[in-house]
Each structure stands twice: as C-alpha cells, then as structure tokens.
Image: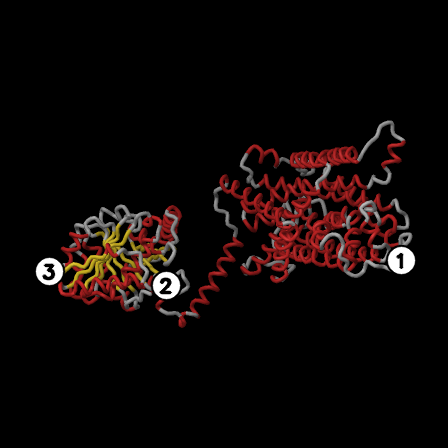
Amino acid sequence: MASTALNPKGKFGTAPVFLTAISTILGAIMFLRFGYSVGQLGVYGTIAIVVIGHLVTIPTAMALAEIATNQKVEGGGEYFIISRSFGLNIGAAIGIALYLSQAISVAFYLIAFTEAFEPILPFINEHLPFAINKMVIGIVSTLLLAWLMLTKGARSGMTLLYVVVGILAISLAMFFAGGPIDGFKAADTFHFNKGHNDFFFIFAIVFPAFTGMTAGVGLSGDLKDPKKSIPLGTLSATIIGMVIYIFIAFKLGSSANAAALSDPNRQLIMGDIAIWWPIIPIGLAAATISSALGSIMVAPRTLNAISLDKIIPIPRLNNWLSKVKKDNNEPVNATLITCVIAFVFVLMGDVNAVAEVISMFFMVTYGSICIISLFENFASNPGYRPSFKSKWYISLLGAVMCIGLMFKINTVYAIAAIIMMTAIYVVLSMYNKKDDMASIFSGVIFQVSRNIQVFLQKSKSNSDDTAWRPSVVSISKDSFDRFAAFDLLRWISHRIGFGTYIHHIEGYLSTETMQQAEADQARLVKMAQISDSSVYVDTLVNPTYKASISQALQLPGISGQENNMILFEFNKHKEEGIKEIVENLGVAKAVNYDICILSSSDKDFGFNSEIHIWITSSDYQNANLMIYIAYIILGHPDWSKGGQIKLFAVHPEEEVSEQRKKMQDMIRSGRLPISANNIEIIPKAEDVTNKEVINKKSRDADLTIVGFRYEKVKHSGPETFMGYDKIGNVLFVNAQQEKEII
C-alpha cells in the first residue's frame, strides 16, 4: 500500500514543503507591520491576533494533513484536494480564485521586497549616473524571477530557497540577540493598548502573515512521497511559525516603546533592535524574495492542474496551459501567464486593496479544506482512512473561524470574493453540464437522511393526523407505455407528499433480469430528471404482479416513515388491467393503506385546468382525502396557472340545502382554494345513476376524482370502476379512515 503513494516523477522530499511554507509565513508582514501591531495593541493584544489567526491555520493544516494521508495528492495541491472532494465545477471556481490570489501574491511580495532597499536608495542614487526608485527595482526583480523560473524551473528556485531561508534564520537570530533601542524606558507595550486603530483593522493587516502554511502543498506533483511530506512539512511550518511570532512579539515589546513601534517612518524598527541593523533589510529581502519564489512555483502548478482537468471553456487554452517541459515537468506556459500577471500588478505599485481580496480567497480555500475534513468525518465513508486523523470539531472550528473572520476583516471584500467565485461556478456549470457531485456530498446526504429517518421513526408515536401527508407507492408494469400514473405521482410528491414509483418486471431474479432491471431503472431515472420530479424510482423482479405488490407494500417510504397510500393504474378500455388490480386490493387493505386507482383515457389529463371531485352520501369517509389530493395536485406548476377545483355532491333532494351549507363550512374552515361558486349539490334522481350524472357533468374535466367503498368492490368487482367512458382520466379513492381537515 505504501508504495502506491510514491510519485515516480517526484524530485523533492519534505524539506521544500517546509521551507516554502515557513519562508512565506515569516515574510514581509513580519518585518514591516508586526511591530506596528505591537505598538497599537500591545504584546498581549498581538499575541491574541497570533492565537486567533492560528485558530484558522492550525485546523486547516491538520485537515490538510488528514486529507493528504488518505489520498494521493497530485499536481495542483489545494486545488486538487478541493476539486476531488467537492467536484470539478466547485473545485475550479475556488481553484481559479486561488490561482489568481497566488499569482497576485508574487507581485505583493516583490513590492514588499523593494522596501528592503529603502535605507540604501539614497546611497545608490548618489553613485549612479541616473536615479532609480522602488518601482524600477520591482520591475527588474520581476523580470529576473521570471527568467529564472522559465529557464531553470523549480529546482533552481529550491536551491535559492535554501539560501534565502538561511539568511532569514540569521536575521532572526541577530534580532533576538539585540538589545533595546535608544531611549527605551520601562515597557508600556505588554498590556493591551487601544491605539488609533481597532483590533480587527490590525488583524486584517497581520493575518496574511500566517496564511503561508499551505504554500508547499502546491508542489505536491513534484514530491516523491506527498502523503509523508505534505503533513509533516505543513504542520511543522505552522507550529514553528506560530512560536516564532509569539517570541517576536515579546522581543519587540521588551525592546521598544509603543510610540516608536507605531511610527510609520520606522517600519524596519527590528533593525534598530538587531545587533547589526543591515541584517534586517537583508532578511526582509530574503523573506520577500523567498515568498515570491514560493508563490511563483506554486501558482503555475495550480493553473496547470486546472487546465489538465479541461475545465476552462476554451479547449485550445486548456491544451496550451497544460503543456510542460519534457525534461523536468515544468508548466512553462502556466508560469509565463503567472509572470505576466505578477508584472502587471508590480507596475501598479500598490496592491494593498488587492491584498485584502487575496486574503479572502485564501480564507475561502482554508475554509473549504476544513469543510472537506468535517464532511468526510461526518459521512463516515469506509474508504476514508487517513493515517493522520484530525477531529471533526477542530475542522468545524477552522471553517467557522474562516467564514466569521472574512466578514469581520472586510464585509465588502468578503461579499465580492463570494460573488466572484459564484459567477465563475455558474459560467463553468454552463459549459460543463456533467453532474459531478462528489462522493463527499453523497456521503453527507446519506448520513443526514439516515439520522432523519431514525428520528422520524422514533417520533412516530407522537405524531397526529393533523400532520398527515401522502407517502405514495405506485407499482406498474406499463411504465413506458402510459405515463399517467407517473405524472400523478410527481404532482403529489412536488412539495407536500412523497412518491415512490416501482416498475414491475415479470420473471425470476437472474443475471438477465437484473440487467434488464438496471436498464429499466436508468430509463426511469431519466424520466424523473426530464420531468423535474421528486419521485424516487426503482424496479422489482417477481414472477407475479401480486408478489411485487406485496413486496412494495412492505418497503419503507423515502420520507423515513412507512408509505400510507398505494396508486394503481389501468387503461379504461382494457378490462383485464382492472381485473388484476381488483384481485390484489385485499393485500393493500390488509396493511391499512389508502387506495387510489387511476383509470387512464386517451384524453390523458387534458389541459391541466379543472379537477372535479364527486362526493356521495355512501362514501363520505373518502371526501376529505379526495379534497386533499386535489389540493396537492393543484399546487404543482403544471396545474397552478388557472387550475381550479369543482366540488360535486349527489344527495336526496330534501338534503340539498343542508349539504350545501355543510360543504361550504368545511371548505371555509379548511381554508381550501375552492370557490363557493364551484360547489354544486345535485338532487339524486331515482331513474339516473351516479355514473350517468358524472359522465354528463364532468365531460370537460381534466381529472375526475370519485370515491369508492371496498365493500362494493367485493360485491361488484371490476364493474365498480367501469362505465366512465365519456370523461377523461378518473381517480378512484378509498380512505382507510377519514382524514381531518383543519
């Protein structure tokens, strides 16, 4: 198993991951702005920033280590992890934003690099025939860095990285060996100070210093053993970086007053403390150039990984960006694009506003990594077996902190970052229509569904009839010949009800019938997708229709509770269909199911406009269920435009007035969408049957709902459901018990 984690193309071990991360963590902000934080907030306030910041970075590093020890992290680092966990469209939306932040970070670090020349610029200009400024230094540095990466590649960058990290270590050692600045009195910087700026303003300035711990992950495609190197390098850099920042805060607080630390003209105050002041500008130069090196090595690999997934809507651009050098696997074209972006932002000269947006993208990335770890732990996928295990509550803390701090730092930029990534996702989804919902979401949904079902089952004893809703199962062997039953089921299950549609396949279970079942289920799923329904579809293989009915009646409903209604369907012009249904009604009655039988006609459901409900004195128990079903159907968009319910009742003439008032009161108290003008009580004539009245009155109805009694079916058989030839589809309803309309 261990050998499968090794990358035969990998060149690097753990050291580059650690060095890339630590050099980015101990970067420009440490030298230029950390002293300002101590001056404004005091040592303890600054340590609070360090601790809060690491409530994001440590959970992220642990989540990253967990994920990396479960799967092989290929090229692209963070993008690879997110896209393989959340799916390509979501992963690419975050990945593109991540790439831009990495590319712009190169410019940010190079501009900070030019600050190291501030103390010696006057001396340089005195000895040159022409004057130069920091912009010129930034442009030259960018061009040199681009030349280095395009011609020599990451290996030369790593060699240089060893040198600059060595200089960085020396500069920190000389800083800690130094003493207090001139004029320093008793420290006034230890306790929390309220400077000119509030806590979260300073936090926004300092926090990006801690966000470099994932920088080395982008080298995943160039590592010999990513499963070992990524966790070890990332976690060690994060923890060591945090400890160093805490010590720096104490050293600054014990060596300089708040006024000196807050002085904008003394950004390099660490030089006044160090035993040899030039080492601090040199260290700043080393830190910023190493951070720029880390970013310029990582960003092209993120872009290259995105292009290899063919996610960009322009195929030629995907092919061009995915090209690498054959001898060293360097993504040369992606590097060229990264250098161009960096050069543009260096020319701008000021990326302070952009830096906050960069922080937002990094926060989204870190939050995503924590959410992946959280979801994987919650989903309990047996295939998720990392050798390094974080805790779900640590990942939850990291995710919550990321989201909260995004809006606390800058609400406008947080919203802008989210809108940008949402727009990228929408565009990518338009071009990549394949449903790529990753298994992590399926696992989470599975666990949520299971917990809900267990909860509903336990709470069943506390439920009452006022919360009743239909949970319908329908069994048909004519699924691909007539769609009326499926349509009715999808209308019932649109919002209020639940529907399970089962296609009966006659035969014994075998390899052949299983293949047929899988093919038929795929057709049913396609039907459900095309019709945008919420119906759950399945197949059953049984030697008889009755066996499938018996089996389906014992299946749990998709709502988490048992089904409570069965729907049959037959062609009203073929008597054999209703005969088979009648023979099996006793099974449904035995398990206390409400029964619906749909009689399909050539008219189908017409214009989806009028539903007629017929109530007679002999089947009043069915009335409320029939009204409920009509009301639920009318809530579907197919019926909601101009759809109406008309209520008819047949009673002896002397009861007409009383029954009309009773019906109107029921409709009014139940708040049902039935107009009083749509209620008609018909006097019962001795020489006219109910079927004749229904055939005459409901000739233009799109669906007619009629109640039936099981006792009559036992007496009259299939004839109960025949004789409605002059009207369209008829739904016969039998309620196991009277439903309450409240």
Left or right? Give the position of 597 relative to 124. Answer: left
| CA distance separating discs 1 and 2 | 81 Å
Is residue 453 something one can see in this rendering?
Answer: yes
- The residue positioned 88% from the left and 49% from the top of the image is 272
If you read the primary sequence from the N terminus, does the residue marked by circle 1 or circle 2 appear first? 1
Q: What residue type is labelled 2?
A: Leu
Mark seen at residue 322: none
Question: Who's the residue at 31% across and 57% down the image?
Answer: 474
Q: Name the residue under label 1.
A: 185
Q: Distance between the residues labelled 3 and 1?
A: 111 Å
Looking at the picture, tell me which residue is in the foreground, 11 or 603. Answer: 603
Q: Which residue is the site of mark 3? A: 685
In the picture shown, does residue 422 fall above or below 709? above
Position of residue 307 measured from the top left corner of the image (x, y, whole percent): 59, 39
Mark 1 lies on a secondary structure that is loop
- Residue 298 showing in the rendered view: no
